[in-house]
Amino acid sequence: MATGNGSTTLPILSEKHFQAGAAPANVEDLVAYCDAHDLVAIATENHDVVVYRINGQPAFTIRRHNGDAEVTALKWKWDGSALAIGWNDGSFALHSGENGRLLSQGSVRGNGKEKGWKLDLAPDFGYDDDDEEGGPVAARFSWMKHSSFGEPHTSLGGGTEDESLESLEQLTTTEDWYASVASDGDESNATLQAKRQDGHSAVSALVKTVSDLDPTIIMPKLSAIPAHGLRAGPDGNKFASQAAVDAVFESQSKTGNEGVNILLVCVSDGRILVLQDDEVEIGSIRTGSGKPVACSSLAASSTHAIFSTAGEGLSAGLADIPISALSSPLLHAVALNTKRINNLLPYVTHTIRCIQHDFTTGLNFPTRLLNNANMELAEKQEEGDIVSNLFHLAMTTEFTDTMKEWLVDIVKETNHKRWDQAINTMYTNIHNHIFVNLLPALDRLGIAASALRGHARWHEGTNKFDAPPALFSNILSGVDALRLIVKKVLLTVMTEHRQFRAFSKWLRVMIDVGVAGPGTKGAAETEEREVPNLDFPLILAYIKDTLSGSSLAAYVNQPEGLRGEVSSSKELFAKSELNAVGYEKTAAALESVAGGSLGTQEPALNMPCTAVYLSAHVRQMDEQVTKWQGRVLTEPESVPLEGASHSTRLLDTAMKTNNAASTLPCTVETLEMDGENPQQVVLRTIDREHSDHSEEKAKMLSPAFIDFPAMEVIDAKFYANDILALVRDDENGYLIIQADQQRQVRIAIPSSDGFVPEHLIIGGRPGKMVCLVFSNGGLEWKALDLDTQVSVAMAEEEEGDDFDMSGMD
């Protein structure tokens, strides 16, 4: 509606008042708007991150991961599916945009040393950086899915896709590919050339299709991993529900022709970590030593603009993402399979941790009962232990006084049920973990590693993919060894479970006989009725071999010599336990125990030991692949912002591009304000020229100065092709001015007692744009509807006597 002073009032979508501790800690830097879903993420004074719907209702909360953590950066993914959070301990994490569940985490620092090489499967509960207080942190994120249309693909070896196709023709039969374009003598050279180009396109499509082949799509989905009370760190959250598992593994979309998903983690010391598909780090670049204060990117451009404080002013770094290389079939296949391996490995290790937990907790109660019996036997100085006494009872059905007392008074019906339930649940859970979770994950892990080894063997000796095939052979050796062990464990579980069911049935009969009284008529009737149904070979085997110690312990428990971490891979592989691991060694060890049970721990047959071996080789692969991928990155072009000083305040940035241009040139615009002249906003434009495909140069255009006489600019943001400026007039009233080169529209801010506007956030999408106005240090917001038809129709243009834009071309 129009107001009496000729301005427009926008409808209020919502108003939000924050309680103490829930207000934004820093409304300028730590509030992020999700354009796709109209969600507002706020880092609160309590250092949690609360996500609100646009109506002011909380959607979910992400708690800080330790008591001292504070948020340093917030950024929504371009499609709203994830939220990136930086913490002051140097860590950063990606959380689900649906419910805040942790998806992945990383760190921008290493305490001045390399991350240790773990010798066990202890979960990582976060980064301990107490020794590096004040170290580098994630200061900004730049997140975009870049389109790869219209760009010729290049390989890491430097050749174009056409050159790769020519090589392919030399390696295959040309007639097979181009038989359809053979001349019959009546076709012109132009027609033949056109058909040959069609042949090239067909080969190109074939290369991409083959690289995108994914055998796992015909396999059943991986299932959630039930933890059964295990505190398992981030991996427990990632795989705790079916929806969570699907989000991890089904989010690995084929980027290929659809684009390249890039996340830049801008570090406070000037480094920029480049991640593809959210998790695969492909290298790092550097903008200088300044702290990043703003980022800007666009799907249709290959450039990310990073603005940093440099000395006493601001500077811009224009980082080019090599879209053509990153979307090439080879690098796409490598990145996709590398990400799969890095997601499947924690799935495997978490499953093994759950098996260890189920094994330990399942034996707790039975162990207490057996220890009680041994103590009773020792106190009464009777011969033998509980195993020999139960074996004697099974063979003779003769009760000693101690055994009768133990069975009737200690075990009795109640504790027998608990014993039976604990062991049956243990074996069932371990069986399910192996059959439902572990074996399917190992199959997928083997497929991904085999695909990478195939690429490594094909390109061996070239710089197109110089990861040695042995890296992937070592991973496959670990996968195959673990698969052999797991299948042996599965057979052991089935055997012991069958024995226990027979033992438990017999034990219940002995309890009933003991209650009735050995030698009585009731006991005789019970024995006559039940004993013929008992399987004594299984009962005796369980008492003799399993009752006091399951064979699973040697396969499942962590070796004592493998705990903690070491500083290097050389030190890790020097461990005798890991030297004994590998497919051939595991196969030989299994052959040596064929037909018998494993009494002592053998590293080649130990699941945690083999998992550590596998994890170490995956890390070696990651380091080599990251080194190779990093070669496609180039250092950003530095563009000083002339005239910007230490008092210059960067209000907003935006990037635009000419979609019709094949080389995707872009312009970057900034809104700045000098603290010494609050009545003027500077509009600066950086034009990124692409004179040819190999040469790029940024050109700084003359800035435009937007004056607001008799007003003080509080904040300003880009809005479509206009500017929204939050100003205070000479009567101490607040309003928003929407301006472009031709007109000005005054927008009155709905007034309320004590509402003092301080900051603007513009978000949304075409047809649903929203302006959040924060006041009183972030204690309150008003959400205004920018796309209301009423406000546009009733907007009144005013003369330019109180508004001037100079310097615009």
Image (cartoon, grey):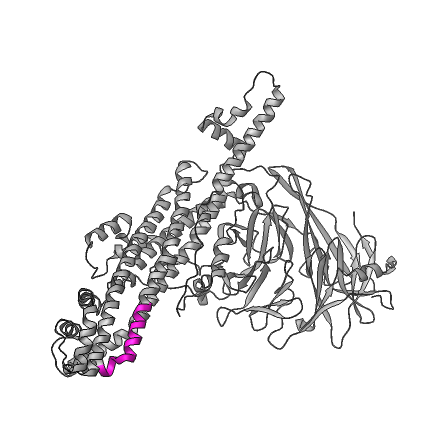
Q: Looking at the picture, does residue 48 appear above or below residue 244?
A: below
Assign the magenta stretch its main secondary structure: helix
**Can residue 14 be spotted in the picture?**
yes
**Residue 730, picture quadrant:** bottom right
Residue 35 is situated, as x and y percent measured from the top left of the image, at 65, 58
Residue 433 is situated, as x and y percent measured from the top left of the image, at 36, 61
Magenta span contains residue 734: no
496 and 303: which one is in front?
496
**Does residue 405 appear left or right of residue 573 in this picture?**
left
**Does residue 580 appear left or right of residue 801 in this picture?**
left
Name which residue lies at 58% across and 28% down: 197
Please count the marks in the image.
Answer: 0
**Residue 350, picture quadrant:** bottom left
Q: Looking at the picture, does residue 330 appear above or below residue 764?
A: above
Residue 664 is situated, as x and y percent measured from the top left of the image, at 65, 42
Outermost residue to the top: 185
**Does residue 513 appear left or right of residue 259 in this picture?**
left
**Can residue 405 be spotted in the picture?**
no
Name which residue lies at 48% across and 24% down: 175
Residue 362 is situated, as x and y percent measured from the top left of the image, at 31, 70
Magenta span contains residue 420: yes
Name which residue lies at 47% across and 63% down: 241
Q: Looking at the picture, does residue 265 appear above or below residue 404?
A: above
Magenta residues, start to end? 408-425
